[in-house]
Image (spheres, grey):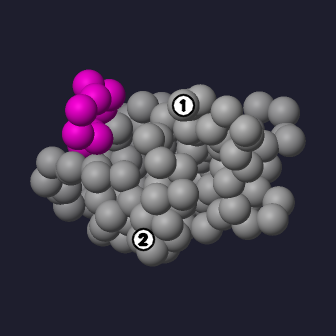
Amino acid sequence: VQISIDDSAKTIAFLRDAIGFISRPTGALATNPVVANLIGLPGAQWRITHGGILGTTLDFGLIEYSGVARVKVAAGAEDPGSPAFSMIVRDIYAAVNQWTKAGGTVVTTGGKPIVRANGAGNVFVRDVNGLLWELIQRAQ
C-alpha cells in the first residue's frame, strides 16, 4: 500500500502511536528528473518511508512530496471512490481511544463507535493526513 502524506515525521509518529506502525529509516528528499516528468511533476522532490504493522505482512509506503501544489481533500465514506482503510480491532473502544490520543479524529456521527448487540461494531476515523479509516470489531 502506498499513500501520499503531508509530513513523514508527523505521520510516522501518529501511526506508531495509533496502530503500532514500525518504520524503516526515511531518506532525505530527492528527485529523479525522468520519473518526475513521467508522473507529471517536474521539479518535485519526494521521499518514501516503508514500514508495517506488527503481526502483518503488509508493507506501507508513505510518500512525502515537496515542490508541488497541493489541495487537501477530505472525502467521506459516502463519496463514491473515496479511499478508506479498513482495520479489524479486538476492542473498538480501546482502539478509538488510542487513535484519538495519537492525534486522529472520529468522524462517525455521534463521535463514537456503533456497536451492535452481538458485539460487532465499526467507527470511521481520520488520521493526521485526513485519510479515512474504518475500525471494525467482529461479533463476540
| Residue under pointer 2 | 102
Q: Report how far apart the C-alphas of labels 2 and 1 lie in the structure.
A: 27 Å
Q: Is residue 97 above or below residue 120?
A: below
Query: Picture coordinates of residue 40 (x, y %)?
Result: 55, 40
Estimate how packed mark 1 is, as few (under 14), some (14 to 19) or many (20 or more) residues with alpha carbons within 10 Å: few
In magenta, the rendered stretch is 51-59
Residue 138 seen in the current view: yes
Q: Residue at x 70, y 45 (%)?
A: 115
Q: Secondary structure at mark 1?
A: loop
Q: Residue at x 85, y 41 (%)?
A: 79
Q: Quadrant of the N terminus?
A: top left
Could you tell me the amino acid type at mark 1? Gln
Query: Picture coordinates of residue 64 (x, y %)?
Result: 40, 56
| Residue under pointer 1 | 140
Could you tell me the amino acid type at mark 2? Ala
In the picture provided, is 52 more to the left or to the right than 106? left
Query: Picture coordinates of residue 7 (x, y %)?
Result: 40, 66
Q: Is residue 100 magenta?
A: no
In the picture provided, is 12 more to the left or to the right than 94? left
